[in-house]
Every structure is written in C-alpha cells, then in structure tokens.
Amino acid sequence: MQNFPGVGVSPGRIVGPVRQMPRPLSEPPAGEKRAPGTTADGAAATLQAAAKAVQAELRGRAAGAAGDAKAVLEATALMAADPMLLKAAVKLINAGTSAERAVWEAADGVAAMLAGLGGYMAERATDVLDVRARIIAALRGVPAPGIPASDGPFILVAEDLAPADTATLDPAVVVALVTAGGGPQSHTAIIARSLGLPAVVAAAGVDTLPDGTEVYVDGAAGTISTGPGDRERAAAAAWAANASTLAAFTGPGTTADGHLVPLLANVGGARDAVKAAAAGAEGVGLLRTEFCFLERDTEPSIVEQVEAYQGVFDAFPGKKVVVRTLDAGADKPLPFLTDASEPNPALGVRGYRTDLSSPGVLERQLAAIARAAGQSTADVRVMAPMISTPAEAAGFASLCAAAGLHTPGVMVEVPSAALTAESILREVEFASLGTNDLTQYTMAADRQLGPLAALNNPWQPAVLQLVRLTVAGAAAEGNGTPVGVCGEAAADPALAVVLVGLGVSTLSMTARSLAAVAAVLATVTLKEAQEIATLALRATSPGEARDRARGKLPILDELGL
C-alpha cells in the first residue's frame, strides 16, 4: 500500500479506480514561423477568430452553470479575450511567428507576470494556460483538453485542474478529485465543496499513478492510499450510507441544549438562492454581487442591478439576506474599476477601497440594493469587504444611511479589523468573518499555492485567536453586536463547533454543507463547544488544533466527516 498525504478540502470516503487527466497539448516547435503564403494579417485574424470561438464556448457553458461553476467559467471566458494576451501574440505574429507559437509564447509571458505578482493574481496564471490550450486546440481543429471519458465512475487525478474543466464536472462519473498541486482555496477545492465531492489537493506524487489503480480517498483526513483493504472498503461503504442521511437540512441550526445557530448559505445569484432555499438554508449569509459586474466593460445600470438582487431577495421572503458590496480587484479585475497593473493586487485597491479611486460605483450599488430591498420582504443587510479601520467602517455606514439601508456591516478579513474590532464595530450593526482572506493575510500565505497549504489553514491558532478577538470586541460594545462567519471554515463541521464555541452567532456556507454541519452541532451543548474551542486555542499548530477538536467529536468518524 502506498500512501499520499495531502490537504483534505472536501470530506468523504471513496474507493475507486484512478483516471489521470490527459497530458496537455504538445508545445508548438520553438521558432516556428508562419506558413509560406500566410500573411501576418491573415494569421492574426485566424488567432482572433479562435480566441472568440473559445470565449463563446466558455460563455455558453457558463450560461448553463450556476454558483461557483458559473463564476469560474465567466472568469475564464474573460481571459480568452484578454487584450494583453492577444496583443502580445499579434506582435509576435507580425514578427513572423506562427499563430500557434505566438499564442504559446504570449501566454507564457502573461502567466509568468501574473505568477510574479503573487496573491490572487498568481492564481490567474492557471486561467491563462487553460485558455492557451483551448485556443491552440481551436487553431489545430482538435478537441480541447478535458476530463477523460469513461464507461464507469472514477477518481480524477491531475497535477492540477483547469478552471473550466473543474467547473463542469459530472458528479455521477467523477466521484472524487485528487490533485498533486493546488491549495485549499484553488478552483478544484471550491468546486469540489460545492458539488459535495470528496477531494484532496497538494498530494505530491499522485499524478504518477497508472490509470486503473484502485485507491482509497479520505477527503476529511486528506489522504490517498493504494491497495485498499477491508477496513477502507467498510469506511467507504459507511460513508455512502451516511451521505444519504446528510442530504437534507430542515433547520433550525441548534446545539444539543437548544442554543440557536442560524445556518445560512453563500450564494452568487438568484439561481443559487433558489437552490439554497430548497436545501433548507435559514437565510443568506453572503450574497456575492460580482455576478452583476463580470463580463462587462461598463458598470451595470441601477435597473439591471435591482433586477439581479430582486431574484435573490424573493427566494428568502422574511429571512435574512446579507449582501456583500462589490469585491472587485485582485482576482476579480474589472476594466471600468480596477487597475490591472498594480504590483501586488491582493494588497491593493480592492473591495471597499475602490470607492477611493472610483467614487460613485459603490453609491449606485447601494441605491440599487435599497430599491430591490424596498420591493421585498427579505431582511436585507449590507456589508463591505476589506474594511481595515474604524474610519472606513464609519464611511461605509454613512453611505448606507444615505441610501436608506439601516443595517450596515463589515467583513473582517484583514487582521487590523480583528485587532480593533471594538472600535470598528461601534460604527456598524454586525460583522462577518471572511476566514479565507483572514487566514491568507494573517499567515502571509497565498491561499492558491499548494506548497503553502499548511500555513494557509483556518485551523491556525493565530487565526482562531483573531476570531476570538473579533467576538470579544463585539461583546465589548455591550449590545452584543453579532459576528458571523461566511468563509469556507464554516463548512467544516468540526471547525463550525469551534467557531460557535468562540462566540460566533451565525454560520454561512455552501448549501451542500448545511446538513453535515447541523448534524454535528446537534451533538454538543454550547458549554461543550466552548470547551472544545478552548482546547483548539491552546494548540501550537493547526494539526494539533484540529485533532484536539475532532477527538471530542466522535460523530465525525461515524459520519465520515
């Protein structure tokens, strides 16, 4: 038996055969020139047509997708028409290079530049290389690289997965995901969680396993083993049986002694909201409003935004819907709002900060949210991302008041916001912890990089301490300002118990995680959750914190979580 340790990003236990992602398209020969008789203008036009065809194909797939999958496909479609990539390729064509070689070299340059920027922009390098392969396949008239066909279910293994491929997985065929690279917030991890697929990333060496090799994947433990025995098969069978019992959540979220913990959903549009409501979500803890702004060269009108938000609000009549204002910048550049040339976009003008460089966009968005809220019975609340100071919180609250929105809040994802929570929360009505960015900024570890996965872990004691400080700052106000969590940490049932023990009042997650989190919370009292949180806080490593918490939650092993 061979063991491949990695980072578990989506729980579940599966035994099945491996299918490796096909190798990428071959590189065009170095120095390859345009074919005789082919003009530069003709080759450039052919390249432009291929890029447009790729973009159209990706947009078509996005139209039929929802949630995270839709967002990933839309972002990749944008990259297919990226002016920087195409201009660089056309310049090489004009110098005599073939179209295939030109787009290959141009993409190398763009990907290297993005990787050098680090942070969110480094993750965009994968998008560029994916688009390059698709454009070259279009130029050659061959199918683009993709998920292998199979007569039966299999475990998909790769060095990493292209965003567009990950976004359109068929869970009936691909029963688990394993990658040698990637990190806990890679496209692979995000899509796996949204589909409920067991997944492990950063498992070095798995991409060398031959097709057909039978393996055991434990998405909670983050391990892959070849030659599974009776013990592993029994664990997989138990998971399959228990998974069906975790398919439904009827609410409310509560601990064993009746302490209410509303379980909310993270959504990216009306379709997501309808599905979340059907899954039993008690409201929306994070409405990502970027879906209104992507694939546009201009800001959407207030009327367009009202219509988009209205669909989400209507899915949750009488229930809480927390709207995050536009979180543009970093991995979500917008041509009318952000500066793509920033040297370090993750630390640049993003989120609330864009109101400094492009005033008016946020004000108009708030007006649209207010108008949609006025036509709905939903309990609409609004929060700003990337708040770092009390002055920023006060400024956002003032803009909300001017728009007629009376429940402003802030995202706590910058360490300074956690450290000064008492002052910041004097200015607003609630806070929501964005644990993905909070972990990244606390540990100075790009959340997309596999080699830094151990650092970029929400179980890090330093991150748990910042959660504790945020809740303490809210309590110091004397009026019990609520603090929720809308980052991926809320979807981990064990970590959810710790967060509740630290004083977090609501948890928001992908709708597929609601039932599992509810099942585990229902087995502990509030006092027991507090004791488990104390054990985790006293740990000296994320592994120790996780093991301490899981050791007090035997239900996790019973359910395969």
Image: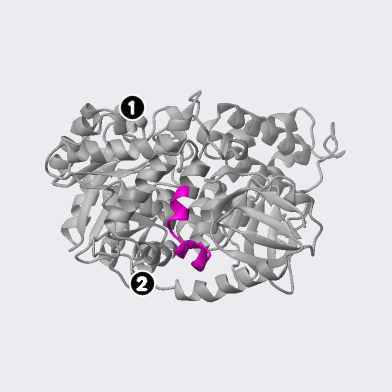
Q: Residue 278 bears which disc, if any?
A: 2
Q: Main secondary structure of the magenta part?
A: helix
* Residue 216 seen in the current view: yes
The crowding category of the residue bearing disc 1, from other C-alpha atoms within 10 Å (few below 14, some 14 to 19, many at least 20), is: few
Image marks 2 and 1: residues in contact by CB distance under 8 Å: no
66 displayed left or right of 422: right
Q: Which residues are magenta?
A: 548-561
**Residue at mark 1:** 357
213 displayed left or right of 494: right
Residue 133: give x, y in percent of width and height: 71, 47
Residue for point 80% across, 61% down? 211
86 displayed left or right of 243: right
Residue 289: give x, y in percent of width and height: 35, 49
Relative to 451, is 263 above or below? below
Cα separation, mark 2 vs mark 1, equals 40 Å
The crowding category of the residue bearing disc 2, from other C-alpha atoms within 10 Å (few below 14, some 14 to 19, many at least 20), is: some
Q: Nearer the viewer, residue 374 or 476?
A: 476
In primary-sequence order, the first of circles 2 and 1 is 2
